[in-house]
Image: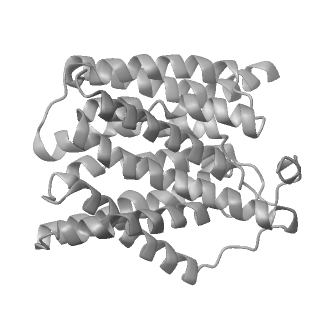
Amino acid sequence: MDAMFQKRKSPVPPNQGLGQLAIALCAICWSTSGLFIKLLNWHSVVIAGGRSFIAALFMLTIRYMAPPKKAPAYIRGKNHILVTAAGGCCYAGAMITFVIANKLTASANVILLQYSAPVWACLLAWLLIKEKPSWEHWTALVLVGGGMILFFKDGLETRAVTGDIIAVISGIFFGANSVFMRMQKDGNPADSMLLSHIVTALFAVPFFIMFFPTFTLPATAAITFMGIVQIGCASLLFSYGIKRVNAIQAMLTASIEPVLNPLWVLIVMGEMPSSSALLGGAVILFAVIFSSTIRPIMASIRKY
């Protein structure tokens, strides 16, 4: 597998700026989940499976309308299929364990522990694809960790150990997904995302039968938005961005999602976050901006 991912000339010119923007837009799409889940009185696994089913249909439609370019010969074959499957199963695992953990522990615990993902992405990218994190990434990891603790301090609980463990597993899956998708930077990472939604939708079938949802107009609109925008468009944006941004930076940028989540609730429903949450959000945003811009800024300074 190592030979498959040796450095080669990429068919896509690297453009980290557009990659960063795509990941940030992906995080914005992801962040709308909290608001729309409030409109759905459905079982959490049914929500996950329903939105993934719609997302898979959406991605297949986009693929039919704009077929992806054929991957270069050196990344096609058995290893490519394994990496695509690994990426898809990891993201499906992240989505499924996330909703299960939400049933077993506080939501704040789940989000905080799932967003250990940058740490796992950092370690796995270093181990598997030799993307060694730089000093600004380590600095940002510390800042994001501190910011997350501040952000969710008021909602944390310590009683549900099983839920917390599952949330950590979700974070490992989430971080690993970014690494496996990064391995496909010269191919089509969207294949992994499409597979993940198919796996999640199939996993949810028994729950759909046992907890058949009520399809009111608001519920149908909410699940459709979540399928097309919240994870459908997000999947395409993440697939575009991960081709241009390394795995650790992608996960750091994606960590703005939990900061934006309560923002939409505030705008629509007037629920004001606490002062510690505002401070934590500011720290996270600073860490993401710092890790994304410090190297280009230093390069510009050196020119003068």
Q: Residue at x 55, y 39 (%)?
A: 175
Q: Quadrant of residue 36?
A: bottom left
Q: Is residue 47 above or below residue 165?
A: below
Q: Residue at x 21, y 25 (%)?
A: 155
Q: Is residue 188 above or below residue 183?
A: below
- Residue 156 visible to an observer of this rendering: yes
What is the x, y in percent for residue 200? 41, 62
What is the x, y in percent for residue 248? 61, 34
Q: Is residue 136 above or below residue 114?
A: above
What is the x, y in percent for residue 7? 87, 46
Left/right placement of residue 39 relative to residue 106 reads left
Please name the colour scheme applied to the rendered image: one colour
Left/right placement of residue 172 relative to residue 43 reads right
What is the x, y in percent for residue 215? 14, 74
- Residue 304 visible to an observer of this rendering: no
Q: Nearer the viewer, residue 202 or 64?
A: 202
Furthest toward the bottom, the residue is: 64
Q: Is residue 232 above or below residue 177?
A: below
Q: Residue at x 64, y 20 (%)?
A: 136
Q: Nearer the viewer, residue 303 or 8?
A: 8
Q: How many marks?
A: 0
Quadrant location of the C terminus?
A: top right
Q: Nearer the viewer, residue 23 or 125?
A: 125
Left/right placement of residue 286 relative to residue 82 reads left
Q: Nearer the viewer, residue 206 or 121?
A: 206
